[in-house]
Amino acid sequence: MSAIHVVVRPSGSPSQRGQNTLLGLIDLIVDGVNLTARIGEALAVPLLTELSHAVLAIETGRKTRASVQVYATDDVWEIGLESDGQHVLLTLFRTAPAVEVVVFERRLRRAALREALAEAISSAAVDAQGDTGPLAAAARLLAALAPASDPLAVAQRSSHALSRTMGGVKLAANVSLRKGSQSLGRDGVERADLHALLALGRVELTVRRKAVSLGECHVFLLAERLVALAEDVLASWNDGRPCFRRVELSGLTIGAQRGPAAAPLALTVSRRDGTKVTFPELEPLALVRAVARFSRALSDLVRAEDPSQALNLRLVALAEGARQLERGAADQTCEEAPVTNSSPESYRSFAPAARSESRGRWEHGSKMRFLPRWVATVPSIDLSATFLCGDRIIVGSKRETACIHRNSGSLLWRVPMARAASVATPAGLARIHPDGLVTLHDLGTGAAKFEARLQPRTGGGASGAVVHSAGLPKLLVIAEGDRRVTALDLVSGDVRWRFTARRPGTYRVRRAGRLLLVTGGDRSLSALDVTSGELVWRLRSDAALTGDVSVDHDSAFVLTQDGAGAALLHVDPWSGQVRWRAEVDERVALSSGCLVARDSVVVPLRDRRGAGLMAFDRSTGARLFAHEPGLCAPVVSWLCVDADVVGNTASGALLCLDGRTGALRYSHVFPRHVDADQPRRLEPVLRSGALFVPQHQVHVVRPRDGELLGTVPTDLIPDLLRVDERCDVYVAEESGHVAAFGAAARLTLIKG
């Protein structure tokens, strides 16, 4: 029996296999042992052809290593060949969905490999139906192969001891690496070549003088797994959430488990034979640093032995992942000290005005009537790019932006524009493109006033604030990249200042008078001076901030949340001091922020049961009431009106709760014909003492007592609702229509 056999097992009749391919199962048998364990269904003729060309490349000396990919039904396998004198080293491994090495460097005689391929090609050519020209050509090249005139390449190995220790955690390995024989970057192409990185070694993990052997494994694959494990540990530490992660390699299982907040880490190493070793009370950042340094040292050693691997994408990814871990761990250890503003009076004078009560001409008196004015058609409306700006309505769509006069409905201008994040400012319409381009368009003509190029935001969409108040510069402040906040001048388009944070994150900006409150999803809340970008104060929290800051006059409220629960902080926006802290023992509704009423602060709650509320006294932080989730539908839009909280739900119900007691003051259930009639946005609008509620239709309610004042007579679904100072209503339906309705004259009884 020969040393190697390539067996082709046809499946089905020739008619079922098709005319151009031989569909079957391929087995590689070496020394009587089936190495592939029947890889799976594949195209036999192309596989044999590619395998033959790989053997030819090695036999002719063009390559010292070659590989062939095999695509099974759900897996991707790779056959790697490497020249070693009179022998060829055969490696078989799976690359997707998870890496698994079945055979590593099985030594085969060159002649035996060629004979096995010739026999398999002959068998396949007999069974194949159709064109076998490529296979026949490969067979002729193999048969005509002359003995090599140059000395045959010999695989060279060198043994290395690798050890890195950080914070009592030590990773050590003895590994045998290939020495490079190819020129560096000869073709300038980066490739993902896992075959060149496979190297066996013995690895040992030591924690506080307690050592455990991880056995013999492929060191590069182990480093990849450890980097993925360390990334989750670092992310959980940064966010203050629990971590449960497990990685596996060659019968070895490494698991990391930690609780919320600053809980320590428990690292468990399990083997296939059932033995298990646990390292409790481990410092998470120590493990992260040790893994990062070990992985970087391994990647540097591989490049030193084989310079051509500098263009190996998998090695580059490992080195970059290790660098990211080191930067993240360094950011966590370099704690930014809290900063308090010692002179808050200069900023207190720019405090936003206290919110006015719901007073207006519709607080008392008769019903409201609305008269249709005009209807405009704009295909594929982008609701987030539609604004009411004075006497103009800016309507964005997928391909263009249009400007409509609010009184007549006439089209003032239309400009082709690609979809982008849009911000309405007094100076014009700012559009922030995904590639970082910021353009300001004139509201009168739609022409571009200026363009600025910033770094693209990494995630979370556009975030920023508009500064356009007396005594302050006219700025558009944008979160740029993953750690910058940049202020653009709305007149010149120049960058006025740029603040760079220490840590990367998804930063959000909220304006409070002359200050900009910046959160980035970590434990810090920073206040920047609008005019200069200087840091005024910084607050450090024990748990991660949700990123939603609510500002009302001289108060700022921010939520924190980790695995242990949530908390509400009342912060003085001018000094940065925490006035009080209240625990929230329910799951808060993320991206909703707090609701600030006249005498209370209300935290929206949400889980699988629905939506709820929890209220605290605005002065002391004492809990006033709590409605567990399930009070109403999970999709709800809340609004504080004076001392009350109003919620417009996706189920068609309107609720009004007392802001101090939580008692239900009134409710309405509006009819809806079908579920598709639900508007995209449910935010109610308060104007002149009347509350405009978008449902199947726009209903007008007096918020003081819940009396229905009127209904806007529109056939459009109010996906977007805008109300101007005259109580004229503008409704936009996402399908492509905008309608305007004017409030009819109000009759007033005059007593003589």
Image (cartoon, rainbow, N blue to C red):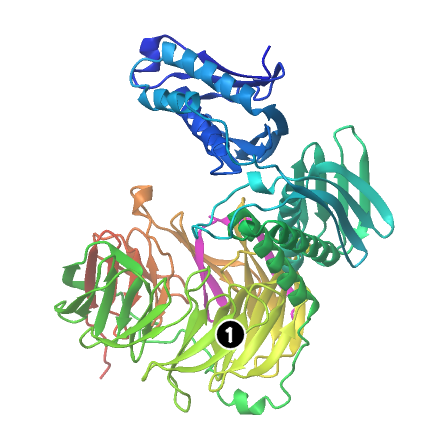
Extreme-front residue of the structure:
149
Which residue in the protein does label 1 denote?
551
Give the residue at x 63% y 41%.
Answer: 221
Location of residue 515 in the rendering, given as x and y in whole percent from the top left corner: 51, 81
Q: Is 646 contained in the magenta span?
A: yes
**Disc count in the image?**
1
Based on the displayed image, in which of its 4 quarters is residue 413 positioned?
bottom left
Q: The N terminus lies in which quarter of the figure?
A: top right
Q: Is residue 711 visible?
A: yes
Question: Which secondary structure, mark 1?
Answer: strand
* 34 relative to 286 in the view: left or right: left
Work out whether residue 587 can be spotted: no
Residue closest to the far top? 13
Q: Judge from the rendering whether residue 219 lies leftward or rightward of residue 146; answer left or right.
A: right
Residue occupying image coordinates x 34% and y 19%: 21
| Image coords of residue 63 (percent x, y) | 49, 38
Q: Nearer the viewer, residue 213 or 577?
A: 213
Q: Main secondary structure of the magenta part?
A: strand
Quadrant of the rendering where the C terminus is positioned = bottom left
Which span of residues is magenta-colored?
A: 620-647
Q: Residue at x 57, y 71 (%)?
A: 557
Q: Position of residue 663 (x, y in %)?
A: 54, 58
In the image, residue 477 above or below residue 409: below
Instruction: Determine the residue positioned at 38% across, 49% down.
Output: 652
